[in-house]
Amino acid sequence: MVESDNSVSLICEQDRPAFLGGKPMFDEPLHIIKPTLFDPEEIIPDLKKIFSLGNITTHQYVKKFEEEFARYLGVRNAVAVSSATSGLMLAVKGLGLSGEVIVPSFTFTATVHSLVWNNVKPVFVDCEEGTCNIDVSKIEEKITRDTTAVMPVYIFGNPPAIDALQTLAAHYNLKLVFDSAQAFGAEYKGVLAGGFGDCEIFSLSPTKVLTAVEGGIVTTNNDALAKFLREARDYGKSGDDISHIGLSARMSELHALVGLKNLKGVDGHLQRRRELIELYKGLLGTLDGISFQKIPEGSKASANYMVIFIDEEGFGLSRDALCSALKADNIGTKKYFYPAVHMQAAYSMFRDEYGPRLPVTEKASDTGLALPLYGHMERETVVKVCRAIKRIHNFIKTTKE
Ligand SMILES: Cc1ncc(COP(=O)(O)O)c(C=O)c1O
């Protein structure tokens, strides 16, 4: 029993959360992500082959990876690059985007960097309550003579309203570029992400469902764009000449080898992640003040992240306080996406324009917390994370009563 404080006198010591002096739920730090990898011995023969051939970048393994990636997603072209950020930058250039592009502010900063690096003005549109994706009903009012494209994002791997976006883009003759960095394995009306819009850009960084250590892939059914991207990732080389102002953004053979190997096991990892998300939802769904991202009927999210949204009044603590409390339990979490892009120091020039005008974005950004999730995570680990959250919630609620 806790004797020093009357208000908690009925609380057993074992129910006391770690941030108030109880025993941490985990003895060792639990990371928010761990890449799901394979036994490195399995790639030694291929590594030896790559080394003996001496072609260590953008050669046969990259080609094979691109082919298998395109086949998996059912799209004509997949162009491997050094990161999703470079892929986004090159796609913006290749599609000739200029003037203004409509984009969410509730996204990872690289979405918007790719526009600004290309001298394009981002025009932020609020996200939709629940799905957290760009609110299509608010796009039209932002279209001007200078608008050249819309750049939606699969937020946490959740497909945006693709049909409505396609109709809108076609009506206003705008390009449609999907930031699909978190979307590997996502489905919209039974179709895998990859072939929508003018192109989609995937990330293969360590935090993603499919990783190649680092890297990105642009998928497109537009052959001319694919040709541009292949040249542009290699400084803009076209034969002996330089035909575009490109980047050095090739993928190495070693990254492609890891990507290829991971692609083979990805179905199992996706399935596992989806099961773990369901487990999280089942265990946390009954707690006051916790809600989840809404996945629209007919869509499947990629299960890249498990994000909860905290309502301070219902839960008893703010998102930030819960984040700190879980840290004391040795549980790694991430405030996600926080700050929203228009609130970041690098984008301070947009703060006055958008400051109070993206209320759903700011609410999501102030309340969203990503919990640990990875393909080889044990169910028991999820149960313990939920137990820690429940313990914090119950203790706070009981002490407040
Ligand atoms: C939505 C989004 N866009 C772009 C990126 C950038 O990806 P990369 O690290 O491969 O450049 C990320 C990375 O997490 C992302 O989440």
Image (cartoon, rainbow, N blue to C red):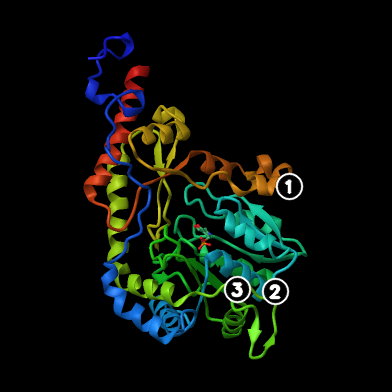
- On the image, the x and y values in percent for residue 383 come to 25, 43
Name the amino acid type tagged 2.
Gly
Q: Quadrant of residue 302?
A: bottom left
Q: Which mark is residue 96?
A: 2
Mark 3–mark 1 distance (CA, rounded to whole Å): 29 Å
The answer to whether residue 1 is above or below residue 34 is: above
Residue 248's tag is: 3
Circle nearer the N terminus (2, 3) = 2
Q: Nearer the viewer, residue 199 or 208?
A: 208
Question: Could you tell which of marks 3 and 1 lies nearer the N-terminus?
Answer: 3
Residue picked out by circle 1: 349
The answer for how far apart the CA atoms under marks 2 and 3 are is: 19 Å
What's the residue at 37%, 71% (across, down)?
Answer: 258
Q: Residue 319: horizontal and vertical position, in percent?
A: 46, 35
Looking at the picture, how far across and down is residue 253, in whole percent? Answer: 44, 77
Where the N terminus falls, by quadrant?
A: top left
Residue with the most extreme right position? 145
- Disc 2 on helix, strand or loop? loop
Q: Are the residues at dot 1 and dot 2 in contact (C-beta closer than 8 Å)?
A: no
Q: Looking at the picture, does residue 36 appear above or below residue 380?
A: below
